[in-house]
Image (cartoon, helix red, strand yellow):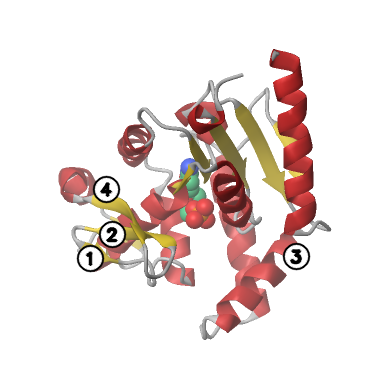
Amino acid sequence: MKKTEDLVIAIDGHSSGGKSTFAKAIAEKLGLTYVDSGAMYRAVAVYALENQIIEQGEIRREKLLAELDEIGIEIRFSKTRERYETWLNGKNIEDEIRGVEVSKWASTISAVPEVRVAMVDLQRKISENRGVVMDGRDIGTVVFPKADVKIFLTAAAEVRAERRYREMLEKGLSVSLQEVLDNINLRDHQDSTRTASPLKPAEDSLDLDNSKMTLEEQMDWFEKLLEKKRGISR
Ligand code: DC
């Protein structure tokens, strides 16, 4: 197995399943860069909402494709906030990308094949010549089919909705639990049934159902997995 600093770790799974928390903890533990690929699709959705690409509940596909090159997405690390933040054409949009409206449109927009090609390209560029932990839907299947570790993280929809609901309340967002659950069910359906890179486990990924697991337990599971892989490749 490669040196720790060169490892590529792919974490895929359904919406709000705790992928980013798990991925960040792994990145911190191993000293790797964390990349939230979903934030990029969210950034495209923000651009579309702000630039009349989404109008009357529809995506104007032609306009979206014509402007795809003008959507400049960057992921920067904020030392003051100690987190990675998403920037769109020079503007920090980290706080606006997590709401229900952007989540809904990010899912719809991520089904557009040309958007996926551009985002996969960006995801590979960000990871050039360095180890990363990246979370998303197609990381183990499309972005890094040769990733060193592939994990498919899942949890019951009700458990995911409850977690997301609490997070949103803490952020002061006004939303009902039912709304969050409906949104999760809709996104699960859209993400798994789209034609372009649908959400599915890679053939060589390992399933982890974290419905009843703490982050600490997930990290214990991960460390055992890594030890086992290191043992095998020795
Ligand atoms: O992980 P997330 O919920 O922030 O992702 C937002 C949307 O982007 C989600 O509906 C699915 C889509 N997505 C994707 O299609 N492929 C990825 N690699 C990451 C996210």
Classify mark 2: residues with Cα within 10 Å, few (<14), some (14-19) or many (20+): some
Q: Is residue 209 visible?
A: no
Give the Cα distance between marks 2 and 3: 31 Å
Callout 1: CB less than 8 Å from ligand 1: no
**Residue at label 2?**
87
At label 3, the amino acid type is Glu
- Figure quadrant of residue 121: top left
Identify the residue at horizontal 61%, vertical 50% (top origin).
189
Task: Give me the disc on residue 158.
Answer: 3
Q: Which residue is mark 4?
A: 61
Disc tally is 4
Residue at 53% over, 23% down: 145
Helix, strand or loop status at disc 2 = strand
Q: Look at mark 1 in the image and give the residue it sits on.
A: 91
User: How busy is the neighbourhood of tag 4: few (under 14 within 10 Å), some, or many (20 plus)?
Assistant: few
In depth, the one of 230 and 190 nearer the eye is 230
Q: Is residue 123 left or right of residue 171?
A: left
Q: In the shown orientation, is residue 66 left or right of residue 186? A: left
Q: Earlier in the sequence, mark 4 or mark 3?
A: 4
Please tell me how crowded label 1 is: few (under 14), some (14-19), or many (20+) other residues with Cα within 10 Å.
few
21 sits left or right of 44 in the view: right
**Residue at 68% in and 23% down:** 204
- Marks 1 and 4, how far apart at CA: 24 Å
Identify the amino acid type marked 1: Lys
- The image shows residue 159, relative to residue 127, as above or below, that is below
